[in-house]
Image (cartoon, grey):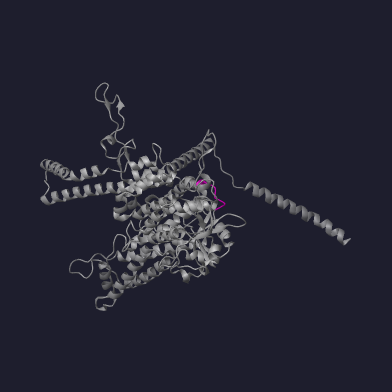
Amino acid sequence: MKTVCNRAGARPRFSLFVLLFCLLTLAAVSCRKEESDFGAGQRAQKKEAQLQNKTLLEQFVIASEELENHPDPAYFENALVRLNPWLESCAPSRDFQPCAEFDARSEEFRLLAETAEEIHTLCAKVSAPREGDAAGAAGLSDDEAGALAEKADLFLQRVRELNRVYHSPLLAQFEAMAAEFKSKTAEAEGFQFGGRGKMVSAAVARFPFTPLMNFHAVGRGAAELARLYRLDTRAFLPADTAHFKSSVWQRNVVSWAKGEGCSPAEQAVNLFRWTCDAVPLRAAADGPLTADSIARLPWQTLLTSQGNAAERAAVFMGLLRQIGISSFLIKPADPARGEGFPLLVGAAVPGGDAPSVLLFLPEYGVPVPGVSKTEGGVPLPATLDEAAGDDALLRRLDVEDEPFPLTSADLAQVRAEVPTDPFNMSHRMWIMMRESVIERSGAAQDNASFIPPILALSYESVRSELSALPHIADVQHAWELQTPIVEQTFMPIASQVLLIPYLYEVAASNSLSMRADDDGSRKYAPTEGTGSGAGETAANPTRMACPLWEGKILYFKGDFDTENGAANRLQQGRVPDRLLKQASLEMGARLDEYIAQIQQAQGESDRPLTDEEMRAAAAQFVAQGRQDLGMKFFLKVTARFYLGLVSYALQNDEAAAAHFEDADLLGKLDGMWKSGALTILAEIYEKRGETARAEKIYSRLEGPAARGGKVRAKWLREAE
């Protein structure tokens, strides 16, 4: 009876529960966030915004695909930044993964920026001292002098901590600046008879700040880096254009340089060989960093065909990413062992039950030699497993008195450093990669006119993949490869200076047989009916071209020998010697004409120029003329190297050898193209079976390329 009563009493409670559930469900449905619609006007406005965003996206995509037509970097930057409203409206990407380590780096740069600006604010209170004064009109109080000392200590600590991660020469210079600043101000504090604030003010006023080496410049750069390292930012930054250029160019190179019908391992070997041929090693610069010696981003390394071992490695790993191969720097498991450890790249190439890690040495320009060979008899790179188990493979890299600084025991347990950066880890790149497939209406086969390159990288996926491989004890971010990003954010002028030869315009001809500045290159075919009289003709204006920029980007595309291909564009930059000589001889006559024009203007002017002003104008004219001649000579020699690359890609070894044997290429411009030209020449003779000649050329390599040349010469001797 009691049980029956309990069940009867349960029914009302159950009904109440059901009713409550229904009410809550109804409330949830009614509160579901739906897009508000206030009528046809708002719908039309939204549609117009969507169409505008699509147009802007298409414009950016076309610009990225046709960068040879847009050498001005501002055009590409503006096209990208205009996409920010579109980016904000896009749905989030499920592939994006936040990263606490990048958030921490962002905070470190924010704090560095904050400290640098606080120091700058205090220093700004001190004006430059006037003659006879210990300090300027303004100065620091004693309390402010004490605060300045504390901030200098804090800045020094923070910049040192960052440089332990990036190993940046520029950060080292900031560290040295801060250490000297601290020393000078601390020394001034010792003269108590003048008052702490007054003496520190005098030391600050005398401190040799430069446009780059000052706390305000550090603060600006660090603040921009703090912004860049925020991976969840839903806005494109001008710096992102560097990533787009690198990715698009690498995708274009891969399309033809990886080889057809090759295994993944052979494709990796082909891309490594292309990287080492197309990017000769540049010598390390001594002294303070300049725009030319600062660490280069991958697009700069690709464009200028100059890079150190790390820059060459970054290009190679970017190429591998475009064909879906995970790559990484191999470092010792014990960081204390890092001294003398060579730059070693591992490529996790799929095959069999698990990927094999192939080993490449960008500094040497060769892979670690393995035991397997291709069908053509070319040795394949050693795997990490092979090199860790057979020291004889590493000993093949010993030369004369320079033993290779690794043994198989060093590779038993290693650390993998993945080439992540603030671009390929960011949310915006995941969205862009998903959304920027532009459809082409009426296409016969492929319906997409643009498939974006691989713009983003899943660190967690790569980490999971690599952690499962033998000999890999740990997986980390390759902060060392981000040094160019850091340095060029502090020193943005670097990109502009490197581009100067590539933005240099010449009068373009429309024939491969003609050169820039030839008489025939001044005009194109005349246009009928545009003359002054009936039936007369007038020439079209001369088309100007940027030979190195246009030719190199067409080379990346594999557009070599068409009427508007790389070879044609590069030929425009080869100003004939006779014209360079003629221009040099005529400089005196042109100077006389210039001075005559100035004197004529003087006579019509209210204030004639003084003799000193006339001399300064003449000197400026001569300097400009010499600079113009020097630039044309640089174009001539550099275009010759790039034309050699084009011929080599076309497997026209005879034409390639003719280019690379050019005396100017081997001996001028401080020998910047010598090692690259000799390396490919040796490869040509090696392919022909002329091993003695190839061995001799490899032995001629100098500077950073010398060690790799010795190794390759040794291998040829061993094969005889």
In front of the other: 170 or 578: 578
Q: Residue at x 29, y 65 (%)?
A: 125
Residue 331 at what x, y percent from top left?
A: 49, 65
Query: Which quadrant holds residue 227?
Result: bottom left
Query: Quick one: quadrant of the N terminus?
Result: bottom right
Closer to us: 444 or 610: 444
Tell which residue pokes out farthest to the right in this image.
1
Visible residue check, residue 397? yes
64 vs 287, left or right, is right
Asked if residue 94 is among those painted magenta in the image, a careful observer would answer: yes
**Residue 417: horizontal and vertical position, in percent?**
50, 62
Q: Is residue 376 above or below residue 468?
A: above
- All told, the count of numbered labels is 0
Magenta-colored segment: predominant secondary structure: loop
Q: Which residues are magenta?
A: 88-95
Horizontal relation, residue 105 to residue 513: left or right = right
Which residue is situated farthest in the front direction here?
720
Q: Is residue 618 left or right of residue 428?
A: left
Which of 50 and 643 lies nearest the eye of the viewer? Answer: 643
Can residue 552 be seen?
Answer: no
The question of residue 174 being in magenta is answered with: no
- Between 639 and 221, which is closer to the camera in this rendering? 639
Classify the position of the C terminus by image quarter: bottom left
Q: Position of residue 395 (x, y in %)?
A: 48, 66
